[in-house]
Amino acid sequence: MLQTLTAPGLTTGRAPFVEEARNRGELYISQPYEQYSKENHESWRRLYARIRPRWERYANEHFLKGIEALDLPTDRIPRLPDINQRLQPLTGFQAKPVSGYVPGFLFFDCLRRREFPTTITIRSSDRMDYLPEPDIFHDVAGHVPMHTERAFADTLVRFGDCAHTAVELTSAIHDRPERIRRLTNIIKAMSRFFWFTVEFGLMRGRNGICAYGSGLLSSFGELEHAIDSDEVQRYPVQMEWLINQGAEIDHYQPLLFIVDSFEHLFDLVDGLERWMRQGKLNNVAPGLPEIHEHDLQSFLEATQ
Ligand SMILES: [Fe+2]
């Protein structure tokens, strides 16, 4: 107890352990569990208690099964090794603690190895709704339960394959500006695809439409809005639309796409790779997201 009271805390934006690791250039870290403060655990407890009834109503059934299978604690932050012990036998996936943002290629490459880069900090208790960057509630309560489902887990691995294909297709281009232009378009297409599916996807299922996207499943306000609000446009997923649609990040999503099943989603990612090989991702519509230098660089430096 004394330890918890005096713990420095692992609060988003105020976590010396994480900042020091980042300053040393360490991306992959441990989860120093004893450093979580009482307030950190209280944030998790409140976030969980608040959203649980909304999961019952709006989450897809695989997510609910995943919550059960992982036996996520309700009153304290989970220990990642405990989660991994339950997760790994199901799909081979593991939550892997990181110190911050993982550049594009490295992120997708982790998925290919069935490792999910996981933030260990948690938002402060006075900012329950505002989330400028991922925290452990988003990553562990929003993403990780989905990784217990076989077809969904395989879909994430296929995203990793797509990143390798992007490198394969562009690494032989000697004209550097052209190589960068093509990669930027491909990364933009992949990011949009990921955004509108893994982060904000809807699926046909119980009660009509339900959520499987982790951005929705970890947001108390947006989860309900995404499914019940008349202001949201919801359409059956279409690849040509996904890869050309700008992804806006600073407000509730006004446009969401529906898949039939995770087998359907897997086939779509297969299609994404096929389109990439055919050159159809080389000229996607301009617009959001911006592709940042470190994301581009991670693809330029990648080896297959
Ligand atoms: Fe996420």
Image (cartoon, helix red, strand yellow):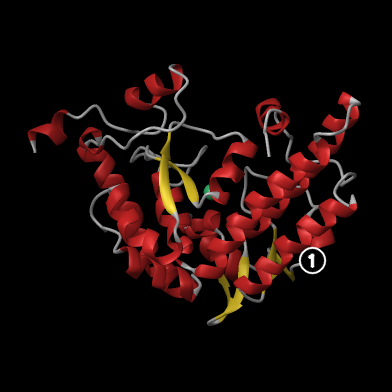
Q: Position of residue 284 (x, y in %)?
A: 87, 47
Q: Is residue 46 visible?
A: yes
Point out the image quarter for the C terminus.
top right
Q: Is residue 174 above or below residue 135?
A: above
The structure residue drawn at horizontal position 67% and vertical position 51%, both measured from the top left corner, is 161
* Residue 204: quadrant of the picture: bottom right
Q: Is residue 78 visible?
A: no
Left or right, 89 with respect to 33, comes to: right
- Horizontal side of 299 relative to 185 (left or right) equals left
Q: Is mark 1 within 8 Å of ligand 1?
A: no
Q: Is residue 88 above or below residue 177?
A: below
The number of discs equals: 1
Q: Residue furthest top?
A: 23
**Residue 7 at x, y percent in the picture:** 19, 30
- Left or right: 198, with 65 as reference point: right
In the image, residue 52 lies at what x, y percent?
Answer: 36, 65
Amino acid type, mark 1: Gln
Which SS class for mark 1?
Answer: loop
Residue corresponding to mark 1: 238
Furthest residue in direction bottom, as rendered: 207
Residue plotted at (52% across, 37% down) = 132
Q: Position of residue 34 (x, y in %)?
A: 20, 36
